[in-house]
Image (tube, helix red, strand yellow):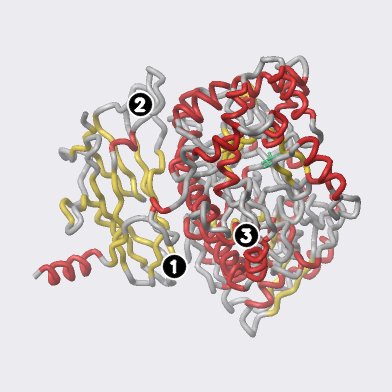
Amino acid sequence: MLLVLATMITSVLGNVIHTNHYGSLQDSQYDRPGEIEPAIKSMVSRMTLPEKIGQMTQINQDLVLLPDGTLNRTAVEYYANNYFVGSYLNQLSRLDHIHGAHFVANATIFPHGINLAASFNPQLAYDAAAITARDTRSAGVHWTFAPVLDIPVNKQWPRVYENFGEDPHLSGVMGVAAIRGYQGQYKSDRSKVAACMKHFIAYGAPWSGQDRDSTVVSDRTINDYFVPPFQMAIDAGVATAMESYIDINGEPVVASEKYLRQLLREQMGFKGMLVTDWAEIENLYTTHRVAASHKDAVHMSIKSTSIDMSMVPKDVIFFETLQDLVNDGQIPMERIDESVERLLQLKKDLGLLERDGWKARRELQSMVGQPSDARVSLDAARESLTLLKNANATLPLQDRYERILVVGPSANDLGHLSGGWTINWQGATKDAWQGPIDDEQFYSNGISIHDGMKLVAPANVDVDYMAGFDIDGTSIDMDQVLAVASSYDAIVVCLGEHVYSELPGNIHDMALPSGQVNAVEMIAKVGKPMITVLIEGRPRVLGSIPEQSNALLQAYLPGPWGGLAIAEALFGKLNPSGLLPYTYPKYVGDVNLNYWRQVNDVWDPLYEFGHGLSYSTFEYSNLTLYDGASVLQENRQLADSPPVLKPGEPVKVAVKVTNKGPFDGKQTVLMYVQQPVRRITPPVKVLKAFQKIDLEKGKSATVVFTVDADMFRYTGMDGVARGTLDHGPVRILINEHVMEFNLQP
Ligand code: BGC
């Protein structure tokens, strides 16, 4: 009887899909920082002060390298014997394996964080991180400065692409997946590295949009929107954290007791190791100007915060100054011990206190760059591609157009596809402004858009390439392009941004260079179907481009294999399934818009967070309560007496999704929550759950979500972090469907 019932339910609901699951372990099996072991405490008690402060000191690798890049053994001995230096970072590529182990020879490079977010598939973030961890570890490196969990409120900020988008929940889910991939069981598994959540906190909201600018932000916004992804990372056991470059309302984070002790340690319960960002203690003196001397800066930071390691990184001044401060009695020894214990516990957990290592490393080295890794990179690129516009089903091209012209600077450049932090800090770029890069290893490990199109095009289709214009929009051979364009059946224009990271990526105008916009306008006048592909780290304002283009495909920074993924999407071998992980502004004045903004009547983005078309049509129906076995109530109207929702008593809802064709495809189901009225002006809506599903054409699936009263918590009038729940009507929104609940105490 039970079996019959189960079969009946399955036939009514289709395949029932519950929550995201990825990785092979149960949640509780992942390692996490914990209490300090007695053996570590005893080791620290036997160390001298210089030995202890050496552990807290991170310097740049160039201090111990010869000009030809080989190790300067004399320098290593000098820094070891005199300064007991505990950690080195690599200036060119640093420890920032944020999208693959890009400084390890032949390692696979993945799409950037913004693409993983657009994929809405945490499995991909997990897999990419697991491969990156193994490749990183194969080079004897135990740590990566990732994932990046800032909320890029300001879209002009040059670090938008490193992050998982503007939504706190999405960022948290992707961050947790990445942390689990990097760390796994890092206390015993020597193919794992420590992850580092960064940059704590509020870094993504620079007032001017320029990197490292001050942030002016309320505690409420910090608690309700910036803390959640970091809290999820802590709850998942992230081993380390990095503070951020900025000052918040004038208070530099690196010297802030409020943010680095009260918030991070006491409120959020972070037990791991905390590192500064690059030269940030020094910056208290040189740029933040809250300290009158270097000594003052070190004193202020170490005394007020729980920082364990200073990324000094160009000299040993931190070492000398901190030693003086302890000897003078200005910093107590217990404060130093607190940090050194955390540092040595981490090193022990990661196996740094063990001998051997070489054999295991050789095994890991033999796995670097295997074809299955590139496959993960390609899959991540595929699932991230976001179809923004597709008028009159211009795409997929299939074999409808026999002669296709590809134009634009991003169509034949792997560096553009991969963005910053690729091979070099400023990316593997051929852009003239940074000088040519000659890296055969990189350029032989990927497929440009033009090459991808030639590979994927049906046999009857010819694909030609002409540059047209460069990344600044300056014409290279636009006259010739326009002279021949009418002899083609369709034109694909690949636009983009310079390759950049951090400060060098600062811009003063969010508009794409006018030359690129003009080029699109001129090509559009030819009157052939025109498809525009965007390769960009942040949503540049597009002017007339969306209107001029018959189809618009957002590829973000899809990595070196992105050209193949884009070609597959253009020709219809792949049905796009990415969704925008941020609000795409229409106007340059709107760079600070988020979908979770408070109610406001000037909202006019180009595309909303979550926008993304498919070649198929997905129909949503039967949003209902769900008790694990059957549907309880049919679609309710807002006026009906709504079901009750109480803290500690979560309920489940189910929604049926049907692929109405004409292609198989993937679809991400988004569940937002909304509170129409509360004491502090509510956000329009906030995402609280999502699930990506794969549906053949004509098939249905039922997606089940849990709705919890905690989803409506916020920081209320009393200022207690996410401590307020206002009772009354609340809603969940899934696609066009709304279900109301009565939130009760
Ligand atoms: C960046 C960090 C990075 C560090 C080390 C800094 O400039 O802000 O994200 O981890 O450099 O490379």
> What residue did someone put label 2 on?
723
Give the residue furthest to the left.
1
Displayed quadrant of residue 743: top left
Q: Where's residue 408, x and y in %?
A: 75, 60
How far apart marks 2 and 1 lie (CA) works out to 41 Å
Instruction: Please state which of residues 216 and 482 is positioned toward the viewer in this rendering.
Output: 216
Judged from the image, the secondary structure of the residue bearing numbered disc 3 is loop
Q: Are marks 3 and 2 in contact (CB under 8 Å)?
A: no
- The residue under label 3 is 110
Q: Position of residue 165 (x, y in %)?
A: 54, 45
Q: Is residue 61 left or right of 269 when viewed as pictured?
A: right
Which numbered disc, 2 or 1, marks the residue closer to the eye? 2
User: Can see residue 103?
Assistant: yes
Q: Quadrant of ligand 1?
A: top right
Counting residues from the start of the chain, the first of labels 1 and 3 encountered is: 3
Mark-to-mark CA distance, 1 and 3: 23 Å
Above or below, 434 against 384 in this view is: above
Label 1 beta carbon less than 8 Å to ligand 1: no
Binning the other alpha carbons within 10 Å of mark 1 as few (below 14), some (14 to 19) or many (20 upward) gives: many
Mark 2 vs mark 1: which is more N-terminal?
A: 1
Quadrant the C terminus occupies: top left
User: What number is the disc on residue 665?
Assistant: 1
Of residues 519 and 642, which is closer to you in this image? 642
What type is the residue that disc 3 sits on?
Phe
* Quarter holding residue 300: top right
Report the amino acid beneath label 1. Answer: Gly
User: Label 1's element?
Assistant: strand
> Residue 227, how many percent across, how many down?
48, 34
Q: Is residue 517 visible?
A: no
